[in-house]
Image (spheres, rainbow, N blue to C red):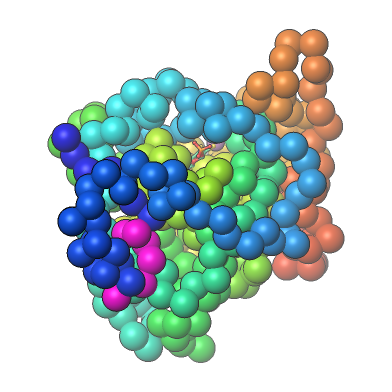
């Protein structure tokens, strides 16, 4: 049986090695919940909305590498091996290189952050992520003054990602942020949810979460982060530039060409709950509206 990712894989390497040595002599301890779960500090940046259930968050997913249906990732993503895992950091940085997950997490302040999450398909969830600010990693590798954007890529491994055996998208899945968006404290790299390591279907072992943008910006299973001075290509923009812009901020006033973005359905709310009005910037306007001062958001959608 393939080994599941343990939380010990994402703690600093020395303590991880020690714990491994201990576990080697006491395999049964692996089943102890206290070791598998973590209790990170709660972030003040959390929403106070009630989170969706773990079952909802892990069975209703978009992850086209594992199929097009919302249930496909939960069925197919178990094939994905996430250990070892390296992220290549390149471009306009002082310390480029391939970094192991343990290195990336070294001295990262892991927190639980409950974020509203809004898909462009007009459904939403509230998810208790475990993660740390992307700015922490970018500061660690040293962003050069000429950098203006961050480009992200997902793993390409068709043998474990059956969706990549057809050209549904132009693989790898790609996303990008402007540097000020990437450095914003709400932008996190998430490594888990509900106190557990990230389920494969949610983007194990490390994925982006940008809560004021439509869900597709929150790229999963990241293997490459590149700092650039030009706006990077993004998968959905390549696929259909008229429907998916670079910014993709949640905006109830700018409709998707094929449907309204003014309201949303909270996954799991039940058929009598009705739709909710969508908030500008997914409700994070106080924190992020300033990033777009003077920009025409109907043109820069
Ligand atoms: N690599 C990759 N990342 C991805 C996607 C994808 O298909 N592939 N789908 C995106 C979309 S459209 C959404 S809504 C979110 C869904 O995240 P969740 O399944 O964890 O809720 O992941 C985003 N990240
Ligand atoms: Mo989405």
Magenta stretch encompasses residue 142: no
Residue shown at 81% from the left, 17% from the top: 274
- Is residue 294 placed above or below 82 in the rendered structure? below
Residue 17 drawn at (x, y percent):
24, 69
Picture quarter containing residue 54? top right
Residue shown at 75% from the left, 62% from the top: 44
The magenta segment is 8-14
Asked if residue 191 can be seen in this view, the reply is yes
Magenta stretch encompasses residue 13: yes
Asked if residue 234 can be seen in this view, the reply is no
Residue shown at 32% from the left, 33% from the top: 77
Q: Which one is in front, 112 or 209?
A: 112
Residue 124 drawn at (x, y percent):
66, 33
Residue shown at 31% from the left, 80% from the top: 96
- Is residue 87 placed above or below 64 in the rendered structure? below
In this picture, residue 48 sits left or right of residue 14: right
Image quarter where the N terminus lies is top left
Residue 249 drawn at (x, y percent):
67, 50
Picture quarter containing residue 284? bottom right
Picture quarter containing residue 113? bottom right
Residue 187 drawn at (x, y percent):
60, 62
Magenta segment's dominant SS is: helix
Q: Which one is in front, 61 or 249?
A: 61
Q: How many marks?
A: 0
Q: Which one is in front, 36 or 150?
A: 36
- Is residue 239 placed above or below 206 in the rendered structure? above
């Amino acid at each position: 049986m393939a080994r599941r990712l343990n939380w010990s894989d994402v703690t600093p390497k020395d303590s991880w090695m020690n714990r491994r040595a201990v576990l080697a002599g006491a395999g049964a301890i692996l089943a102890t919940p206290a070791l598998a779960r973590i209790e990170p500090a709660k972030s003040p940046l959390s929403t106070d909305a009630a989170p969706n259930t773990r079952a909802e968050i892990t069975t209703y997913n978009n992850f086209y590498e594992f199929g097009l249906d919302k249930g496909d990732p939960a069925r197919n993503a178990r094939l994905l091996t996430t250990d070892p895992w390296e992220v290549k950091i390149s471009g306009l940085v002082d310390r480029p290189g391939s970094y192991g997950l343990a290195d990336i997490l070294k001295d990262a302040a892991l927190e639980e952050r409950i974020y509203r999450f809004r898909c462009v398909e007009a459904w939403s969830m509230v998810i208790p992520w475990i993660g740390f600010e992307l700015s922490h990693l970018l500061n660690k590798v040293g962003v050069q003054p000429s950098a203006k954007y961050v480009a992200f890529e997902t793993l390409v491994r068709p043998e474990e990602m059956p969706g990549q055996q057809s050209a549904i998208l132009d693989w790898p899945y790609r996303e990008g942020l402007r540097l000020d968006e990437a450095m914003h404290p709400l932008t996190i790299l998430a490594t888990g949810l509900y106190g557990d390591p990230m389920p494969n279907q949610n983007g194990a072992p490390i994925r982006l979460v940008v809560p004021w943008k439509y869900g597709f910006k929150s790229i999963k299973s990241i293997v490459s982060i590149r700092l650039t001075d030009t706006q990077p290509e993004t998968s959905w923009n390549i696929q259909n530039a008229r429907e998916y812009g670079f910014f993709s901020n949640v905006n109830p006033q700018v409709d998707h060409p094929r449907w309204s973005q003014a309201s949303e359905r909270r996954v799991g709310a039940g058929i009598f709950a009705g739709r909710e009005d969508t908030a500008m910037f997914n409700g994070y306007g106080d924190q992020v509206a300033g990033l777009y001062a003077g920009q025409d958001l109907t043109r820069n959608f």
